[in-house]
Amino acid sequence: MRLLFVGDVCLANIDTKTFAVDPQIAEVLDGADLRIANLESPLTMSEEKAPHHPINMKAEPRASQILDAFDVFSLANNHILDYGEIGLADTIKFLRSENKSHFGAGLDERAAVTPLYLDRPERRLAFFGLSRWYHAGPSKAGTAPDRVGKLESEIQRAKRDNRFVIACPHWNYEYVDFPSPDSARLAHRLIDAGVDLIVGSHPHVVQGYERYRDKLIFYSLGNFVFHNDERELAEVSQVAQFIRPGSLNQTCILSIELDEHGVVDHELIPVHSDNTGLRPQTPERSSAFLGRMEAISRPLENRAEQRRLFYRQATRISQKSSTTLLVVLRQQGLLSLIRVLFGIRKQDLKIVAYSILLRLGLMPKATSSRPAHE
């Protein structure tokens, strides 16, 4: 059984009528038994933006070759609630009308944490979504939380049912090449709980992959379909100067071959993505891309090295965060600022602390925080 995974699919500001999918990419997608993506934008006609969201993205609920290319969508991400409960409800309704499966978010907590069970002749599957952002409550729409305790009983139930368990977390930090220490610990805890494969999303760039207890963890596949304009980012983002040129256009398709025992093979297929379409990367760029994936994956074998590289890159986040807090206070008021502060986690505070120590000269400065194969 062949499964294909891609990263973020966001149709906001994408002209789906002219968006071109190269025949080679279409052939790869068509050759799979199941194709899975993270749907980053709600599909709704609603104009009611959710308050307290930094950016509100959406697309019209209509069929397109992009959506047609996939069978299953994770909705566990930080933009699926950009147009509130209505936007999420419209998205679910539309996906069902198109015979598309989904998981990771719902109109209440029970729906959000309930896995997607798929029974195929080759294998029985269970999909779990997790997100750091906008968790559902007993009577509140939202995403499944990134807490193993909330999902562990369902994971174990799926394993007793002889299912191959897949987790798709929306995690980590934007434009950083390495997973955070917290995300790495979460990944290992998920596998300890019974997950067989992890495919993450959110950073907009690819991150490395590792094996833990002989299970594969792919931390990020980057943006698959996403409106990317580096000039626009330079105007609105405090971290645009740190984005490696062209990195937002470098993505891949993850191919997973399954048999009754588990994963028997995997392959990363390099893809170039921009606002106009998808096409294969040139042989030279493919080789460089795969070499770089290996380079950013090697530090994951050494937790101390991974932490060092992560914090040296992530210090930029503290600069962005301080600016963001001031903007929220000025534009949306104290209540919104309090909401943002309640969302801060220990990992965020560790990044800020490292940044302060670095500025005070108490941490060694890196001559370069980028791995080889740039």
Image: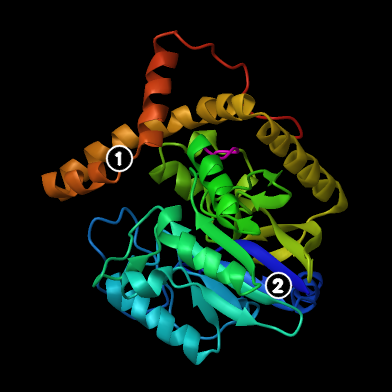
Q: Quadrant of the N terminus?
A: bottom right
Residue at the extreme bottom of the image, as rendered: 97
Q: Residue at x 55, y 52 (%)?
A: 190
Q: How many residues crowd around disc 1 within 10 Å: few (fewer than 14), some, or many (20 or more)?
A: some
* Residue at the spot of label 1: 324
Q: In the rendered image, which quarter is residue 134 located in?
A: bottom left
> Which percent across, then down, holds residue 359?
41, 14
- Magenta stretch? 176-180
Residue at the extreme left of the image, as rendered: 334
* Residue at the spot of label 2: 21
Q: Which of the two residues, 117 or 172, is positioned nearer the viewer here? A: 117
Q: Residue at x 64, y 54 (%)?
A: 221
Q: Quadrant of the C terminus?
A: top right
Looking at the image, residue 307 sits to the left or right of residue 333; the answer is: right
In the rendered view, tell whether residue 122 sits above or below residue 10: below
In the rendered view, tell whether residue 55 sits above or below residue 302: below
* Observer able to see residue 99: yes
The amino acid beneath tag 1 is Thr
